Image: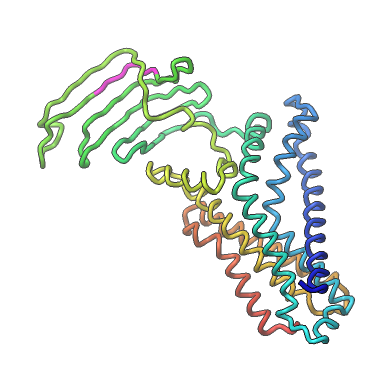
Amino acid sequence: MKLLDRYILKQFLTTFIFVVLILLAVITVIDFTEKTDKYTKANLSALEILGYYGDFLPWIAGLVTPITVFIATVYVTARLAGRTEIIAILSSGVSFRRLLLPYAAGSILIASTSFYFNGWVIPDSNKNRLAFEIAHLNKFANPNLRNIHLQVSPNTFVFIQSYNNVTDNGYQFSLERFEDNRLMEKLTANRIVWDTTKQKWTMHDWKLKKIDNVFEGVKPDTIGSKHLSSGLTMDTTLIIHPKEFKNDYRKYDGLTITELFSYIDTLRSRGSAGIEMYEVELYTRFASPFSIFILTFMGVIVSSKKNRGGTGYQIAVGFALSFIFILFFMMFRTFAEAGSMPPQISVWIPTIIFGIISAFMYKYVPR
């Protein structure tokens, strides 16, 4: 790497770190101001609050990395152009494509580091952050869940009319097992309660119906041997656990990429709803590093021409484009989470759009 490359790369990386720290400081002050009353009501110590922000700040840093890279690129390049350094570089025989090399090296370093941290390191700290927010910041979902449908195995389905995930009480419970699309076993109970000592469910007013000798083309309700049993209470080990019904507030933030793949497969096998949020999070973590490359490339093009008004105009353009990118990202993420668009496509659309714009600017806009 030549002296010029090291010079640009150093400015690029130091500016990126400086911008990240400035944004984190601003966000921390705003967040702390908004949550001061909640900290006071929860009687939290300074050490507990500091621990929370120790987990909060890495998460925010991971979110803002693509935008801070873009802002850093625009700022560094605009300063180089303002001091006519880019004109001198190009006049010495260095091509514009060659000028992009230190920026590319810096964006690769940032993107690979961001991918690793967002994929495996930050989710682990997010588990503590989410637990803190649920416990102290009133981030608790409605404890009374209704009309729960779960596919707990390829042929076994669970239905609970209502469930309280604080007391672990469920009402109007039924478990059905099918074979070849025929009902073979049905277990019902008016109420189920989780026994923390026995680590089992206690079923109240339960009934169990088993059906044998069902022949092809004949309804089970009319022909076949039925075995009926019932009772007031019964302890049993079901293939569900109270954790299935616990608060899942932003659960995807606390899952690594490996855990996201596994959890999405579990949700698909159960036929569960809400899988789109986890898919959006998974594909976003893969799309984010590529957006860093595109935004760096666009930032150099936008700010490489010397402007009579100084660097302020170019920095303003950079912030405007950053806002547009965030707007696109939030809009298409909302579409994906609502099921209007496939998540694996929607999260890539902002990057693709900005990539096309960058290619157009590189070809036609004077640099």
Q: Is residue 249 left or right of residue 110?
A: left
- Against 230, is 226 above or below? below
Based on the picture, tell me whether residue 203 belongs to the magenta stretch: yes
Quadrant of the drawing holding the N terminus: bottom right
**What residue occupies the far front of the structure in this picture?**
1
Based on the picture, tell me whether residue 320 belongs to the magenta stretch: no
Q: Judge by depth and name the residue closer to the eye, 253 or 176.
A: 253
- Give the residues drawn in magenta, as a range: 202-208
Q: Is residue 249 left or right of residue 262?
A: right
Quadrant of the drawing holding the C terminus: bottom right
- Judged by its main secondary structure, the magenta piece is strand
- Against 22, is 85 above or below? below
Q: Residue at x 50, y 29 (%)?
A: 144
Q: How many marks?
A: 0
Q: Judge by depth and name the residue closer to the eye, 314 or 179.
A: 179
Q: Is residue 77 left or right of residue 198?
A: right
Q: Is residue 164 left or right of residue 179?
A: right
Residue 53: percent from the left, percent from the top? 74, 39
Quadrant for residue 149, please give it: top left
Quadrant for residue 313, please give it: bottom right
Residue 19: percent from the left, percent from the top? 80, 57
Q: Residue at x 42, y 24 (%)?
A: 170
Quadrant for residue 184, please give it: top left
- Against 279, is 55 above or below? above
Residue 291: percent from the left, percent from the top? 63, 64
Residue 224: percent from the left, percent from the top? 11, 30
Judging from the image, the colouring scheme is rainbow
